[in-house]
Amino acid sequence: MSLVSRPINAGDHVFLVDGSSFVFRAYFQSIRQDAKYNYRVDKLPTGALRLFCSKLFQFIREGAAGIAPTHLAIIFDKSENSFRKELYPLYKSTRSEPPEDLIPQFPLMRQAVRAFGLTPIEQDVYEADDLNRHLCDAGTGQGRRRVDHFGRQGPDAADRAGRCDV
């Protein structure tokens, strides 16, 4: 995949990755590893960041489900005040706060995405999966097909880490 921005053309593979989901997956994977890999010398936690960057590098190099991306977007949740909470005030009310050692890594994830030459995508009041679905729906309306990272196709695929094939 070239990191040069260009229009999407027929035959391209657009990957839309729920970066927020991958942050948590990386964190919970990192806490099962030796602590020496999860902290800088100054004790700043970096384990989730390390695994997030490894996965991002893998997406850039290899893609997923046997398909390499021509275009890659990393999409993050912007805030806890989503439109879903306006519709249903108890939305995610049983979810606990993020782990203390993950919180300082959130801004580092966005910096890492920029370091890979990408621009993190986020928008107030929307979660990453909402933006992912919207962007993929916009693409599938133009004759593209939706495929999730397991290779499943159809309208319900591509909520977390998906691609839209042109």
Image (tube, rainbow, N blue to C red):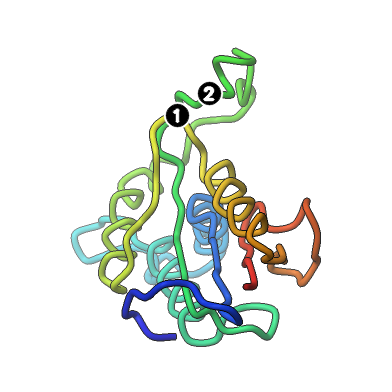
Which is more toward the observer, 25 or 148?
A: 148
> Is the residue marked by circle 1 packed among few (<14), some (14-19), or many (20+) residues within 10 Å?
some
Q: Quadrant of residue 109?
A: bottom left
In the rendered image, which quarter contains the N terminus? Answer: bottom left
> Mark 1 sits on what residue?
125
Amino acid beneath label 1 = Val
Residue 7 higher or lower than 126, as above or below: below
Position of 165 with respect to 40 (left or right) is right
Please report whichever mark, 2 or 1, sits nearer to the chain's N-terminal start.
Answer: 2
Q: What number of labels is visible? A: 2
Is 82 situated left or right of 159 in this image? left
Amino acid type, mark 2:
Phe
- Name the residue tied to disc 2: 83
**In the foreground, 157 or 136:** 136
Residue 96: x percent and y percent?
56, 30
The C terminus lies in quadrant: bottom right
